Image (cartoon, helix red, strand yellow):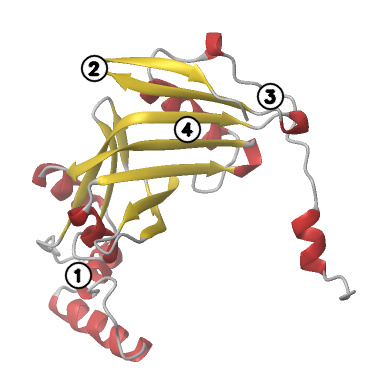
Amino acid sequence: MAPAHDDDAALSRHTDYGVERLEERDLASDPVAQFRRWLGEAAERGVYEPNAMVLGTIGADGDPQSRTVLLRGVDERGFVFFTDRSSRKGQALAAHSAATLLFPWYVLHRQVIVTGDIAFASDAESDAYWESRPHGSRVAATASAQSQPVAGRAEFEAQVRAVEERYPEGADVPRPARWGGYRLTPRRVEFWQGRTSRLHDRLVFTRAGESWSVERLQP
């Protein structure tokens, strides 16, 4: 028998997820309102980067892809994030607009999974968010051909310095045409609340025309 390792203990450890519950009677009338409620609770209860989400896409080759991005807006129209549209994620979304967002609020024993279709946010929204970013972030986004290979860190830093020389601190850094926002319009939103003995609550909103239906799934 192979010797035990610390990581084996970590993999076999069981955690009881507690007694918080999610009942149908406690839900908001629509999934966006319920999401905003949980997002606010995550922030109030000290979740690190509560707006961090795992974006799942399907590449042009059919392979699934995932990465963490930051939610930058949510309203009745959907969930908004910004990125380089020529990046790997941008190419995947150009090939298949269907995507998922996963919000993993581990310390609260909660997660939200949003499934829907993605389209470009407006230029006005992209411009407004771009102008709100720190100077360094705008320089980096301009310098980086996101997802493209680079010979080494030194070459990339040279690209950044070249942009910094063109747009020194205090100068306006124009938004690159390749950079902008996306909005995911949800058609399915699952709210998952961990419970004791793995008897978790799973309540799912599914869009039915202009309204939403709710059902409970077995854990």
- Say above or below: 27 vs 204: above
| Spot occupied by residue 215 in the image (x, y as percentages of width and height) | 48, 18
Sequence-wise first label, 1 or 4: 4
On the image, numbered disc 3 is attached to which residue? 20
* Amino acid at pointer 4: Leu
Query: Callout 4: 10 Å neighbours few (<14), some, many (20+)?
Result: some
Q: Is residue 179 visible?
A: yes
Query: Callout 2: 10 Å neighbours few (<14), some, many (20+)?
Result: few
The answer to whether residue 174 is left or right of residue 159 is: left
Q: Nearer the viewer, residue 170 or 106?
A: 106
Mark carried by residue 117: none
Sequence-wise first label, 3 or 4: 3
> Which residue is found at the position 25% from the left and 58% from the top?
92
Mark carried by residue 209: 2
* Label 2 element class: loop
On the image, numbered disc 1 is attached to which residue? 142
- Mark 3–mark 4 Cα distance, whole angstroms, equals 16 Å
